[in-house]
Image (cartoon, rainbow, N blue to C red):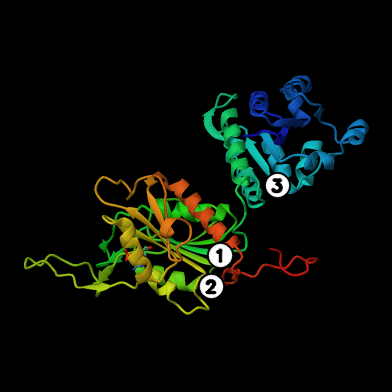
Amino acid sequence: MLNGKRILLVISGGIAAYKSLELIRRLRERGAAVRCVMSKSAGQFVTPLTVAALSGDKVYGELFSLTDEAEMGHIELSRDADLLVVAPASADLLARMAAGLADDLAATVLLATDKPVLAAPAMNLRMWLHPATQRNVAQLKADGIRFVGPNDGDMACGEYGPGRMAEPAEILAAVETFFRAAAVPQDLKGRKVIVTSGPTHEPIDPVRYIANRSSGKQGHAIAAALAARGAEVVLVSGPVNLPDPPGVKTIHVESARDMFSACFLNLPADAAIFAAAVADWRVAVEAPQKLKKTGELPPTLQLAENPDILRAIATTDARRRPALVIGFAAETENVVANARKKLAAKGCDWILANAVGTGTGTFGGDHNTLHLVRKDGSGGEGGVEDWPQMSKTAAAARLAERIGAFFNRSAPEAAPVVKLPKPKLSKGRRA
Ligand code: C5P
């Protein structure tokens, strides 16, 4: 997994520095080359000799070292890695990073780098909870620094709380996650995609509503997978118990009509994926006050049909219609045949059909068995690709990969709707 990856490990002063020795070993076991920079105070906790022995490389510590600068200047040191890991990241080093200081080699390397940085904070809980540290961490996150930990736990100083450095195995997992994500091709960069997800809530009165069992897991996973491939994603989500996916603009709505407006307001887009379980009906007239038991017959709810968002967008004028419109079909029988009918009825380009109902566990579950049916008959026999059962995350990644392939074939209708600033020196557009 980490074969051939180059990691620059910045060790700052803290009792957790001893755990970084274990981290070096684990990174190297997985094939990574680890080069270390130690802050001055790091030497109070671990010796450069141990770090050099474990990393199998020279350890750097001096900003103004003539020999070091002759061998490898601090700028080169900061750029000659695929990832910089700061472990432990002390409160002091985080503060210097947030302020952009360059008062020792560790801070200088972190300021001079153009490579991604992952920090594993380690400090006393009061220092971690201090508004100054929290402000610095928020600033660093906004600057694009990734964090792993800290965890809650016993402190070396005898207190208990947040501030313990993440364990070497957790830091290693974060490093692997980083490289896995970095390996995903950015073939949707410059593309805008709208995704709907979750159920809708249709109000009956101010306290009651009609809903369904959609969890939003599939739609949210699709939004995250598209963002991972570089797309600008607008997720229009009904009420769900899921966090907003990182790197995605999430618009929270309640009813089908709100979802409809949010989708149209966000056109134009290159693609639109309708994974939401939109309620087919709403109550025709929402009661302004809570309906009361009158002792007579229970109230009758008159239903009205909701707008079909997928059909409306798939059949909107060619100027606004996304080049790729994808719907879902939840079927209890004849899944593929019904999906074909739905393709025609909705006017969309692709349908992802899945079997729902008793025993399938699709609603609210973590897995899905999908069939991708394409209107143009491409992509499999009769335009159907049968996917084996897989996690909703894996299904989302596969769909995002298919969408990337769709936009990267040369098709005039698939020119991006989002204009990217042209690179200054390029002549014409790159393929
Ligand atoms: O007609 P049916 O509900 O089976 O269609 C399912 C597909 O249509 C899904 O992609 C769903 O998100 C979309 N849909 C919609 N607006 C509706 C109903 C369904 O976008 N009102």
Q: Of residues 361 and 346, which is closer to you in this image?
A: 346
Secondary structure under the numbered disc 3 in the rendered image: helix
Between circles 2 and 3, the one closer to the viewer is 2
Answer with the quarter of the image where residue 192 lies: bottom right
The quarter of the picture where the N terminus appears is top right
Q: CA distance from mark 2 to mark 3?
A: 38 Å
Q: Is 254 left or right of 32, judged from the image as shown? A: left
Q: Is residue 239 above or below residue 78?
A: below
Q: Which amino acid does the dot numbered 3 rest on? A: Ala
Answer with the quarter of the image where residue 43 lies: top right
Percent position of residue 362, x then y: 33, 49
Q: CA distance from mark 1 to mark 3?
A: 32 Å
Q: Of residues 329 and 307, which is closer to you in this image?
A: 329
Q: CA distance from mark 2 to mark 1?
A: 8 Å
Q: Residue at x 60, y 25 (%)?
A: 157
Q: Is 208 left or right of 374, judged from the image as shown? A: left
Secondary structure under the numbered disc 1 in the rendered image: strand
Q: Which amino acid does the dot numbered 1 rest on? A: Lys
Q: Is residue 22 above or below residue 183?
A: above
Label 1 environment density (alpha carbons within 10 Å; few <14, some 14–19, many ≥20): many
Label 2 environment density (alpha carbons within 10 Å; few <14, some 14–19, many ≥20): some
Q: Determine if the C-beta at disc 3 is less than 8 A from ligand 1.
A: no
Q: Which residue is mark 3?
A: 98
Q: Quadrant of ligand 1?
A: bottom left
Q: Which residue is mark 1?
A: 192
First reached walking from the N terminus: tag 2 or tag 1: 1
Label 3 environment density (alpha carbons within 10 Å; few <14, some 14–19, many ≥20): many
First reached walking from the N terminus: tag 1 or tag 3: 3
